[in-house]
Image: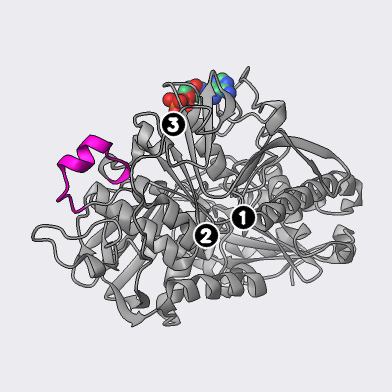
Amino acid sequence: VVDEIGVFLGRFAGRGFGYYKSLRNVVFDYDGVKAYFTRIQSDPYAPPSVFQIVVPGKIHGLKLKGYGKNDYLALSDYLYRRLYSESVKYRRKCGSGYSCFLGVPKPSPIMIYRSGAEIVGEDIVLRIFIGLPASGRRILVKPLNHILSVIIPRIINKFRNMYRCEEEIWERILYLRDYLYIQKLLEEENAVAFIANNSVLPRESSISQKPLANAVPFRVEDRFSREIRVPSGKTVYGLIIPRGLTVITGGGYHGKTTLLEALQDGIYPHIPGDGREYVVSRPRTVLVKAEDGRFIHRVDISSFIKKIPGGGDTRDFISRDASGSTSMAASINELVEVGVDNILLDEDTSATNLLYKDEYMSKLLYDDPITTITQLARSFTEKTRTNLVIVSSASSILLSKAGFIILMRNYKPTIRSRKEMGLVDKLPDKQYIPPRERRVFRGIRGVKKIRAKGSKLILKYVDGIVFELDLKNNPRIIENGQVKMIATILKWIIREKINGSTRELVETINNVFREKGFRGFTSMVPPDLGWVDGLDVAWTINRLYNVVFEKRPS
Ligand code: ADP
């Protein structure tokens, strides 16, 4: 344990970078707060070192016993933001490579668990990157001394006596409880989502998470406005999208896609000021897009596609280069297999031949192997208890099947029944048959290396293949830390030989996180992991190269 930092660091002066290795696990004591490096970078250009700070209960002063398990989400999200905004002030460059780099990645407006700030027992565990300073490969002691004896104590001070901000934290906890209460209400009704009046849905731009300035706030007609008394005592009003098939329609640029994307983002609670605080979706909501070229491993897509000329058995479909329609059919049935609440589709990003065919074309193409989602929707939503929300304005045939229609005009939703719209349902429904056999995951063969780079996962295999998967295709993934988390979980799955049906896989992952947090998947937790649902790991595995699935009767 070191309490004279300056004196201690004297021995590093003039040494080569390799000597930094001796810093690992050396404990620095900041008036009762212990901190140490858990990983030392190999050179100044390698990813920065990891510094862990443990703030004990009697120093942070938060009355953790008064919080419930769910409240920890709001609390750790708050702590992470505090760590970010405090450390970003000191981010500077000195020497070579990452020398003097300090901090954690910028959080987006969603509330999730992040490894940069975790509550472990009574302690707050903070993890930050520190770029150990060097000029070339020569250690620079002065800037290191400044970081460890000036900057770190300042950051730590922000986590002492936190009763001063307990009110601010409490506000976020009350909000989170409201959010979870609404989510539970939706589950009881098997409904899709709730969108409160006055929510601001559009974002500033496609690369920004900030709310669009001067946006038209969401507002539903009074007769469809539901009143919800939330635990905080407030009453919120807004639209509940009910179970079954919902179609969002309207002219171009009237806000349809924006609404659908808000439903996707509603799986996460948001921080105050975001505009989507009271957009609440069921947790297992997935926007499915056509993904030409994706891998498919033994998925039964026969409900949607009977046979493919020269394309093998669609009850056990394999592809290394899927078409738009087969990719969507597979993605949907993989979700049925794990069990999800809502599937969202947007005409703009779908294979339209899987979505609909009008009456005339249905007669003309009597030998078409594709059964459209329009014809299957009723049976699909009943049998799987999975709701469908589809953005569509190109075909009235889909509308004629909808249980709920949202017509968007100038960003204002109006709810119309099929009858009011004069729609006649003439096209016969077809039966959706859930996958007959259960796929059992047996591992990923020949993986040499897995890493995350931005939004991409990069897997290197022993046969020389380098496989890239962009997690941008999964709209549930918001932060790059979540991509890194998926990479971490994949390594754990390979190391621990985790296998089973995708449903079991998802449960196992979620249980491990619930019980052990980030440490359940790696002994060296870096500062930049973001929570993901096991569902998103299954999503990823389904699309990788060299994945082994066996089949078992359902
Ligand atoms: P659609 O899917 O109907 O074609 P979009 O959802 O793509 O329409 O929205 C079109 C444009 O309008 C986007 O640039 C979006 O940012 C903007 N927009 C969406 N909703 C609103 C709103 N409530 N207020 C102001 N602008 C909005």
Residue assigned mark 1: 190
The amino acid type found where label 2 is placed reads Arg
Residue 299: x and y in percent read 30, 66
Residue 213, picture quadrant: top right
Q: Residue at x 32, y 61 (%)?
A: 543
The amino acid type found where label 1 is placed reads Asn
Q: Secondary structure at mark 2?
A: loop
Q: Is residue 41 visible?
A: no
Q: Viewed as shown, does residue 301 lie left or right of 30? A: left
Q: From mark 3 to mark 1, how far is it between C-alphas?
A: 26 Å
Q: Is residue 61 visible?
A: yes
Which residue range is magenta in the image? 354-369
Pick the quarter of the image with the C terminus.
bottom left
Residue 385 tag number:
2
Q: Residue at x 25, y 47 (%)?
A: 324
Q: Does the CB distance between marks 2 and 1 fall below 8 Å?
A: yes
- Residue 327 vs residue 414, the one in the foreground: 414
Q: Residue at x 81, y 63 (%)?
A: 68
Upstream in sequence: badge 2 or badge 1: 1
Residue 423 tag number:
3
